[in-house]
Image (cartoon, rainbow, N blue to C red):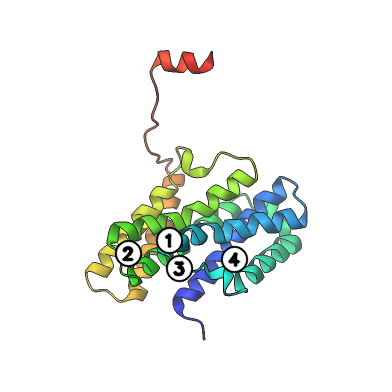
Amino acid sequence: MPTFVQILDFIGTFAFAISGIRLASAKRFDWFGAYVVGFVTAIGGGTIRDVLLGVTPGWMTDPIYLICTGLALLWVILFGKHLIHLHNTFFIFDSVGLALFTVVGVGKSIALGYPFWVAIIMGSITGAAGGVIRDVFINEIPLIFRKEIYAMACVVGGTAYWLCHALGMQSYGCQVVGGVSVFVTRILAVKYNICLPILSGSGEEDSSIKN
């Protein structure tokens, strides 16, 4: 039987794969190209995390990630017309994947004995890096480089997870609180147009760049 963390990982993989494939379909990629975009979206952050933590990436030892991406592609093929009309579909799936992958990354780092700041960073990388790779593949500016709250939601959720862990809460409770924190932060930020301040240069620098 899969563990609770594995279930979260699989659901996050499916959700992120759908978000990547959905955007690839909007760019009119073929099935293989859409699969590749979905796959790197799903495993990109976890791969970077595992390499930094010195462990073998999960998709290299378990084919379930390849299978999940294939199921996500089939889902978009079968229900793509309905997804196109649901403008919030990408946002919901992306937010779910972001929340689930963040708690998986934080939990794995803590289990390996890393300090809390490393765990929060690894959770943020797990959640956000796949989206960066996805946006590069489809020739878009990555979300974390825009004013929209994205990676910061991972930081909020990772911090909430660690605080619960430090207070002695069971791992399930930490995962729920951390994941909900990421999801709610993302939802509220978009709903109420909350964003971080934009770093702007001086007028002379702006004019020199234009020239």
For the C terminus, give its image quadrant.
top right
Discs 4/3, front: 3
Q: Is residue 9 left or right of residue 195?
A: right
Cα distance between the residues tagged 3 and 1: 17 Å
Q: Residues within 10 Å of mark 2 (few under 14, many from 20)?
A: many
Residue corresponding to mark 1: 102
Label 2: which secondary element:
helix
Q: Quick check: marks 4 and 1 in contact, CB under 8 Å?
A: no
Q: Are marks 4 and 2 in contact (CB under 8 Å)?
A: no
Give the labeled residue for mark 3. Answer: 55
**Location of residue 105 in the rendering, given as x and y in whole percent from the top left corner:** 42, 64
Q: Which mark is residue 161?
A: 2
Instruction: Find numbered disc 3 in the image and state the secondary structure of the residue it sits on.
Output: loop
- Numbered circle sitting on residue 14: 4
Determine which of the numbered discs, if any, sits on residue 83 in the image: none
Instruction: Assess whether mark 2 and mark 3 are in contact (beta carbons under 8 angstroms).
Output: no
Question: Could you tell which of marks 3 and 2 lies nearer the N-terminus?
Answer: 3
CA separation in Å, label 4 and label 3: 22 Å
Most distant residue in the front direction: 54
Left or right of residue 162, residue 152 in this image: right
When the figure is inspected, residue 77 is found, relative to residue 199, above or below; the finding is below
Amino acid type indicated by mark 4: Phe
Q: Secondary structure at mark 4?
A: helix
Residue at 46% x, 63% y is 50
Q: Nearer the viewer, mark 3 or mark 2?
A: 3
Q: Looking at the image, tell me whether mark 4 or mark 2 is earlier in sequence order.
A: 4
Q: Is residue 125 left or right of residue 72?
A: left
Badge 2 amino acid: Tyr
* Label 4 vs 3, first from the N-terminus: 4
Q: Is residue 33 shown above or below 71?
A: above
Q: Could you give the CA–CA distance between mark 4 and mark 1, rounded to whole angstroms?
A: 15 Å
In the displayed structure, 174 sits above or below 33; it is below
